[in-house]
Image (tube, grey):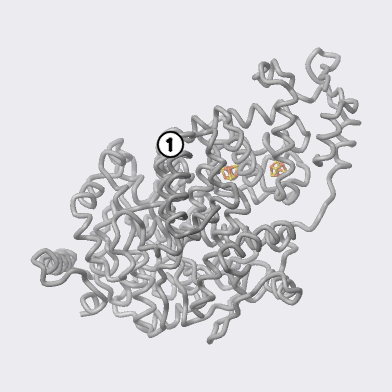
Amino acid sequence: MTLTAGPDGRSSIPIESLKRKKDHFERGEDRRSLEDPRAELLELEDKGELVVQKIDHEALTLPTKYGRPKRIQKAHLWHHKSCGQCGHIPGYSTSIFWVMRQLGYDYHDPRDQTSCTAWNYYASATSNSAAQAAVAVRNFAAARETGYFPLIHCGTSYGHYKEVREELIRHPELRAEVRRIMGKLGKELVLPEEIVHYSEWFHAMRGEIAAKQVRDFTGIKVTVHPACHYYKLVEGDAIYDPDIYGGQRTAVVTGLAQALGADVRTYSTWFDCCGFGFRHILVQRDFTRSFATLRKIEVMKEEADPDVVLTHDTGCVTTLDKSQFAAKAHDRNVGLAVMSEAQFAALAMGAHPYKVCQLHWHSADYRPLLEKMGIDWEKAWAEFQADLKRLENGEKRYLDWDDVDN
Amino acid sequence: MTATDVQSQLAGAPAPADAHYKLPDVAGYPDVPFEEKARLFEEITNDLRFSDYLYGCYECGICVAVCPSARFYDFSPRRIAQAAAREDVELIYQQMQEDIWECSQCFSCLRCPRGNNPGGIITIMREVAVNNGLASAKEALAGYSRIIYKIMSTGTQVSPDMLQPDAFPDWGPETGDVSANLDLWRRALPPETMHTTTTGWAVADSTLIELYLIWLHTGALDMISDVDASLHAILTELMEERLEDEGIEI
Ligand code: SF4
Ligand code: SF4
C-alpha cells in the first residue's frame, strides 16, 4: 500500500474514501436485538445443536432492562464459586451459603468446578474465544450432571458467560468447535436456560430475607456500587425494576438494602467502574488505588456520607476495600467499610461477623459500622478466637456449619 | 474491513492512497514492514467476534467520557474504534504496541450509541498481540506469569496464599494477619470446599484433567509460547505428564 499525504503535506479529509469505507459495514443485529436468548437457545436445542438445562424447581420472575421476564430458581442450586471471593474474601461466599441455609433452600457446592478464568483473560488475553467458551460449557455440563441449576457468584463470571452464550448463539462455527472439544471430554454443549447471578437471587428473595431480619438497619447509610460486568456486559439480562431508581439503574443490591430498611444514598459517579482493571489490580495498582479513591470512595463520602458501600462483585469489593489503606497515608478522605450485599444481608439476619461474614479478611475499618448495627465486635472476636483455639488444640480439624449457627 | 479486503490488499490490489492513514513516521515502528502490520490487522478482523464489535464510528467520544482508563492515561477507546473502522493498519499497530494494555476491560464503553464494543476490540487486539509475541504483550505480562501458571494449572486464579504482605504492601496490615494465620483461618471456614490455601477452593482431579484438555485442544496454551517460552514449557510438561498418567494421549 502506498500512503500519500494531502495537499498540506499531512492530511486532508478523505470524503470519498470514508464513503467507500462505510460500504463495508453491514448493520447486522446488534446485541440488544437478542431480546430473548432463552428462546434462541431452545430453538438451537430443537435443532440438536446444544442442550439447555431447564429451570425445574419453583422460580420467581423478575423484570430485566428491556422488559424480558427472567426466572430465578429458588432452591436446588449449583454454586458456581468465585476464585477471588473464595481466595481473598471468603466471608462473601460463606454468607451466600449461610443465607441460603437459613432460608431452608438446598444447594450443591461442587468440586467439579473451575474458575471461569475470565479475570485472567481480561487481564492478560492469554486465551481465545473457543477456550473461554469451552471452560464455561464444561462447568455448565458439570452442573447439569448433578441436576442442580447453576447460580453464579462472581459478576465477571456472570458477564463473561453471557458473552460466551451470545457468541455461541451467533456463530455456528464456534458451536461446532466447542462441541468437538466437549466430545473429547465426553460431554455435550450445555447452557442453562437462564444465566443467574447470586445478586439476582438475593434480590428475588429480599422479602424472605427481610422477614428473617433480626438486626435493625434503620439509619444505616449505604452507597451502592453497581458492578460493570453485571449490568454493562450483555445488559439486557440485568434486573431493572421501575420501582427502584425509576428503572434507570439496576435494581439489585439497592432493592435488598432498601428492603432491609437501610438508607440508600446516591452519588454522582455511580456509573464509574471501581478501578479494578483486571491486570491493574495485580501489576499496575497505582491506577486502581487512584481511581477507587478519587472517583468512588471520596465522592461517596463527600456527597452521601455513607456508613458502608455495598457491591455485588468480587473485584469491586477487593478494589474498594483494599485501595483505602495507601490513600489514608496521603490524608485522603477515605475510611469507609466495604462489603457485599450478601454479607450485609447475613448480618441483618443475625450472622456472626467473623464466623460467617469473615470480616477479619477485610482491610477498611468495618468496626464503626458493626457498632451502629448494635454488634459488639470485641465480644464476637473473642468468640471467634475461642473457636480457633479448639482448632489449634486439636479438638476439631475444621469449623463447620453447626459451629457458626450456634 | 473484511478478511477478503485485507487479502486483496496483500495480493497487490490497488491500495487506497488516502492521506487520513497515519504514515509510518507518525505512527512509528517504520522498521516493521507494512505487510506484517497488515497481517496482524487481518488476524484481528478475522476473529469471529470482530463483526459483532464494530459497526463504524460516529467519533462522538461517548466511550471516552465513560472510560476510566482515559481519565488516568493518554488513552482513548474512540481512537481505537476509529482506527479499526478506517482500517488504519499503521495506527492499529501503534495502538497494539502502546495503548491496549491501559484498558481496564470494564466495558463501560458499551454505552456507544453505534452499538460498538471498543473494549471488545481491545480484547481481540490483545489476543493478537500475545499470539504474535509483540513487545507490548511481553512487557505487559512480565511479572504476571505466576498468575497464568496458577489459573492454567490449578483451575482457580486467586489463591489465599497469594496474600503475602510483600506482594501487597499497599493493602494494609490485614494482609499480614491473613498470611500469618492462613492455615488456621482457612480451617475455620464452614464450607468444606474452602479449606484450601493454594487454590480458591478444592478442585477435583478429574476436573483439572478436563481443563488441561481444553487448554491443549483450543491452542490456548500455545498462545503464550512467544511471550513466555519458559512458562509455556513448564505448563506443557506438567499437563502432558498428568494426561499421560491418566493414559490420555494428545
Ligand atoms: S462511543 Fe461509539 S461511536 Fe462514539 S466515538 Fe466511541 S466507538 Fe465511536
Ligand atoms: S473497556 Fe477499556 S476502553 Fe472500554 S471503557 Fe473500559 S477501560 Fe475504557
User: The numbered mark 1 sits on a residue in which chain?
Assistant: A
Between A264 and A119, which is closer to the camera in this rendering?
A119
Left or right: A34 in relation to B103 = right
Query: Can the viewer see residue A36 in this picture?
Result: no
Q: In which quarter of the view is residue B77 placed?
A: top right
Residue at 25% over, 61% down: B186
Between A270 and B184, which is closer to the camera in this rendering?
B184
Under circle 1, the secondary element is loop
Between A139 and A319, which is closer to the camera in this rendering?
A139
Residue kind at label 1, given as amino acid type:
Gln
* Few, some or many residues within 10 Å of mark 1 (<14, 14–19, 20+): some
Residue at 45% over, 81% down: A207
In terms of image quarters, where does ligand 1 lie? Answer: top right
Mark 1 lies on residue: A284
Q: Position of residue A240 (x, y in %)?
A: 59, 68
Q: Position of residue A133 (x, y in %)?
A: 60, 58
Between A321 and A258, which is closer to the camera in this rendering?
A321
Left or right: B108 in relation to B178 = right
Q: Image height check: is B124 above or below A312?
A: above
Q: Residue furthest left?
A: A393
Q: For the N terminus of chain A, give its image quadrant.
A: top right
